[in-house]
Image (cartoon, grey):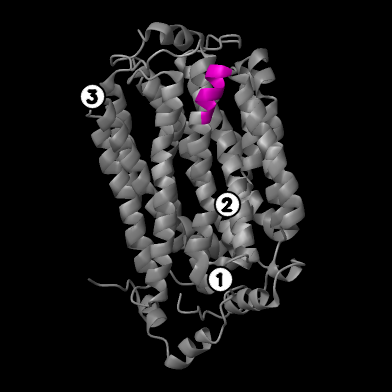
Amino acid sequence: MERYDSDAEKDEQQRPLLHRRQDDKIQRAPACCSSRYGLALLSSYGFFVVYSLRVNLSVAMVDMLNNTHQSRSDHSGSVCTPNNTPVQPKHNQSAGVYNWDSATQGWILGSFFYGYILTQIPGGYLAGRCGAKWLMGFGVLGTALFTLLTPLAADLGASYLIVVRALEGVGEGVTFPAMYTMWAAWAPPLERSRLLTISYIGAQLGTVVALPLSGEICFYMGWPYVFYLFGAVGVVWFVLWAFLVFDSPNSHPRISEQERLYITNSLKNELSTSAGHIPWRAIVTSMPLMAIVVAHFSYNWTFYTLLTLLPTYMNDILGFSIQQNGFLSALPYLGCALMAVLSGQVADYLRETRLYSTVFVRKSFSLIGMIGPAVFLVAAGYTGCKYSLAVTFLTISSALGGVSASGFNINHLDIAPSYAGILLGITNTFATIPGMVGPVIARALTHNNTIEEWQFVFYIAAAINVFGALFYAVFGRGTVQPWAVRTTYSHGD
């Protein structure tokens, strides 16, 4: 099998022995109790908050609707025979319900992304100019505060709820670009996959916890408490973040000297010597960046389709109750989180052995993490009312998607670490479009809630996923681009 996609990638692996020995002289600081792994854990908690605030509406929506609320008592609205559990306590029905049609539901579920898309590129730019710590912190805090206002907005009307959700998106939009900017200063090249998968697994865990817990909260306390409780968790995170996190190793007052030197020495040949200059023309015309854009857009089409509509599918097609719904909707993301961490360990191991180039690892993991989910997503549409098989295929689909966490998803740091936040802002801007239009299109295509309609939705998502994987496999790269740094030597990475 050919392991190199270009002469640059081949040279990366065949550098003179002297250069390799120079790399080996950088003494690696222990991971245990280190500041960089502490940052990974706290940022993981932050993304846990980010995604729990993002997905809780997907479950709460099932309980907020008058028509689904009534049909749940006899499940007359589901295609399959209802999956009733044995004797259960009386469902709390004190919270208000609303008569929103499927089109309005689609706009409400997608409104978050209309705000989210606005702050992607500005987020990457501001993180570099103003500091990533406070941009990340205030972004999450703002989202938490608007989450606390969600029940009030819903009572005022659908349009008010759409505005509040859009404002939540504005706050969350800066989080990923800000964190990428921070990791550019904190993540040693050969620990990137490990650190970033630990950091971003919080997003999957937020989904895993928020979906079933939201179902329980809806059942026992009423849907407004979904937003009150998760919003409060976000405020607590902000307090910890404000006191424990710093923008760079050099500004951290408690980092060990060994770790500080390890991080700064490993990054000194990658970071730009002209941080004040941003090569916009080179960035927007970069084909390796375009490859990430296409892959990110394609992956997110499937991801956001399931993220926003899986609870609806569980309710309307498979007939699961509000409690079952949240738990079963979370299973796919639990598998995704586990595979993301595992793939991060494997990816960095393959790169450390120097047997495979960075671009080979990134492309291989992206192909597995995008084509695999497409196959099982389509298969899930043909399981009919075989509940166990349907949930199994959806879980495998999302789990395989976690492999891409060590593929295109962190390739920004490989090709331009100095501008990783800006690049993430650009790719995430395009990758947010599926979140804006996906739920609207899917709900328009599933107006009658038939299995055949949902099969078509899954086919569209799968086709887009496969296209993105193939495009990235052709045009993706793994070395620092010339426009991103004046010294192109890159640590055997």
Please give the name of the residue rendered at 39% of the width and 44% of the height, measured from the top-left corner: 335
x then y, percent, for residue 173:
61, 43
Tell me the crowding category of disc 1: few under 14, some 14 to 19, or many 20 or more residues within 10 angstroms, Cα based: many
Point out which mark residue 384 bears.
3
Q: Is residue 56 above or below residue 6?
A: above
Q: Earlier in the sequence, mark 3 or mark 2?
A: 3
Q: Amino acid at mark 1?
A: Pro
Disc 2 is placed on an element classified as: helix
Q: Which residue position holds label 1?
A: 188
Q: Amino acid at mark 2?
A: Gly
Please state which of the two labelled residues, at mark 1 or mark 2, is closer to the viewer: 1
Please state which of the two labelled residues, at mark 3 or mark 2, is closer to the viewer: 3
Please give the name of the residue rendered at 37% of the width and 73% of the height, measured from the top-left corner: 357
Range shown magenta:
213-220
Disc 3 is placed on an element classified as: loop
Point out which mark residue 437 bears.
none
Secondary structure of the magenta portion, mostly?
A: helix
x then y, percent, for residue 67:
46, 8
Point out which mark residue 425 bears.
2
